[in-house]
Image: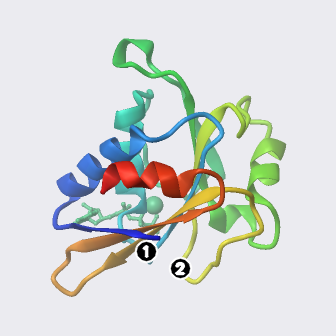
């Protein structure tokens, strides 16, 4: 089971992120793949808007991860942890590594979004949502969601 969505503009990507955020809850892990400039951070910005968190979401290239706290006035209830896998290493469990960062946020209580570099494959983690973003020649993006474990497949039917 897979959900594929075409996103012609960056605004479409933001809007899709906001929609996807409606399916998320504390403890969720999203692994974002796609080449440089694919739109992983753009999608995360939409997720952040949908989750009602504070702070500008930018590429966490020079930090390993950033925590965005919920803004109750915008309906926010959970932290968004936004991490860059380049800095996390590729042979271990990103959940454990993120918890080890001592961010004052835990993966069990947060929505965790990890941007993976191109060519990195999914790791031995529990349930997660794989989000692959591809860039077409005409500059549109195609996002493919693959549920891995948990109740992700069931939750994705809400997007159909
Ligand atoms: N349909 C689209 N969806 C997302 N971004 C788009 C789209 N069309 C154009 N863009 C542009 O592409 C760029 C995407 O950059 P973004 O930082 O989100 O990519 P990234 O995958 O996070 O890259 P990196 O691997 O460097 O972190 C932005 O400048 C955005 O405006
Ligand atoms: Mg990025």
Q: How many other residues sit within 10 Å of disc 1, few (<14), some (14-19) or many (≥20)?
A: few
For residue 145, what is the image quadrant? bottom left
Query: Label 2, on which residue?
Result: 118
Q: Residue at x 30, y 73 (%)?
A: 142
- In percent of width and height, residue 128 lies at 62, 57
Mark seen at residue 151: none
**Taking 140 as reference, is 105 above or below it?**
above
Q: Which quadrant is home to the C terminus? A: bottom left
Does residue 102 appear to the left or right of 41 in the view shown?
A: right
Count of labels in the image: 2
Verify CB contact (< 8 Å) between mark 1 and mark 2. Answer: yes
Q: What is the quadrant of residue 7 in the picture?
A: bottom left
Mark 1 Cβ and ligand 1 under 8 Å apart: yes
- Is residue 60 at all visible to an observer of this figure? no
Say which residue appears at 63% left-offset and 78% top-offset. 120
Eye-nearest disc, 1 or 2: 2
**Left or right of residue 160, residue 107 in this image:** right
Whether residue 7 appears in this view of the structure is: yes
Instruction: Depth check: give the residue in front, 66 or 127.
Output: 127
* Mark 2: C-beta under 8 Å from nearest atom of ligand 1: yes
Q: Is residue 50 left or right of residue 61?
A: left
Give the mark nearer the N terminus: 1 vs 2.
1
Quadrant hosting ligand 1? bottom left
In this rendering, is residue 104 above or below 120?
above
Quadrant in the rendering for residue 22: top left
Percent across and percent down for residue 73 are: 37, 12
Find residue 112 and report its horizontal and vertical position in percent. 60, 45
Determine whether the residue tagged by mark 1 lies in a helix, strand or loop: loop
Q: Position of residue 102 (x, y in %)?
A: 80, 37
């Amino acid at each position: 089971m897979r959900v594929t969505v075409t996103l012609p503009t960056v605004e479409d990507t933001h809007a899709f992120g906001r929609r996807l955020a409606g399916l998320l809850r504390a403890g969720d892990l999203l692994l974002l793949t796609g080449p440089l400039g694919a739109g992983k951070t753009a999608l995360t910005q939409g997720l952040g808007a949908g989750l009602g968190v504070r702070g500008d979401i930018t590429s966490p290239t020079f930090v390993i991860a950033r925590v965005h706290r919920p803004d109750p006035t915008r309906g926010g209830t959970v932290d968004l942890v936004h991490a860059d896998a380049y800095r996390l290493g590729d042979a271990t469990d990103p959940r454990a590594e993120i918890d080890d960062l001592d961010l004052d946020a835990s993966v069990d209580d947060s929505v965790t979004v990890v941007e993976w570099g191109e060519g990195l494959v999914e790791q031995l983690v529990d349930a997660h949502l794989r989000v692959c973003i591809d860039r077409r020649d005409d500059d549109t993006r195609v996002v493919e969601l693959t549920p891995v474990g948990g109740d992700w497949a069931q939750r994705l039917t809400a997007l159909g």
